[in-house]
Image (tube, grey):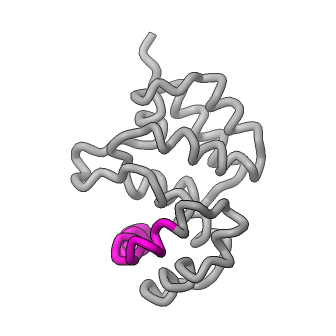
Amino acid sequence: MYQKIYKAYCRLNKGDQADLKRCNLKKLADSPAYFRVLKMTGLKDNAQTCRILFLFVTIDIASDEEQSHSVAEALLNAGVKEQQVIQISRSGENGIEYLKRQLIRCKKLDLSSVGQLAQYWGDHSRRNLLKEFILSQQD
């Protein structure tokens, strides 16, 4: 599913991609480019698909799975502070917008890691992100 959404996004013309980059999560659901992605993938119009596409826009997805990093590892490698991850985990539904701001700084993200985080966005996934981030840190 994540691969289909990302490939559909990559097949969009530059104007539609730019339109999606300018959208916040609420405006994305009303964007014509979002509906084009739905048409290409055959997926349903729901909050999960919208969140997944929202995070895939403007982030650096690794082309090779062997060189990709999970979200927590990528945040660590990008120099994101623990306090910022705590803010993401405590900010509720708005946390996905904060997360995207931090993911833009990251390089070579794993497609499925980002997709799963966006698809199952909620208290449990935010808690797991914080847990993975802390457990990945080197003492």
What's the magenta region? 1-18
The residue depicted at 58 percent of the width and 82 percent of the height is 32
Which one is in front, 27 or 76? 27
Image x and y of residue 71, in percent: 46, 42
Q: Quadrant of the C terminus?
A: top left
For the image, the number of numbered tags is 0
Which residue appears farthest toward the top when viewing the image?
139
Residue 39 percent location from the top left of the image = 49, 89
Q: Is residue 10 magenta?
A: yes
Which residue sits at x=22%, y=46%?
66
Left or right: 26 as drawn, with respect to 15: right
Residue toward you, 104 or 128: 104
User: What x and y, as percent, mark residue 67?
Assistant: 24, 43
Side of 6 relative to 86 (left or right): left
Image coordinates for residue 30, horizontal then vertical, percent: 68, 78
Is residue 45 placed above or below 47 in the rendered structure? below
Instruction: Answer whether residue 119 is visible to the viewer in this image.
Output: no
Could one spot residue 37 in this view of the protein? Answer: yes
Quadrant of the snapshot with the N terminus: bottom left
Secondary structure mostly taken by the magenta-highlighted segment of the chain:
helix
- Vertical placement of residue 78 versus 5, above or below: above
Residue, x 39% and y 71% (percent of image)?
14
Where on the picture, by quarter, is residue 127?
top right
Tell whether position 76 is magenta: no
Q: Report the residue at 52% width, 30% height from top.
A: 133
Could you say which is closer to the camera, residue 86 or residue 34?
A: 34
5 on left or right of 51: left
Q: Quadrant of residue 40?
A: bottom left
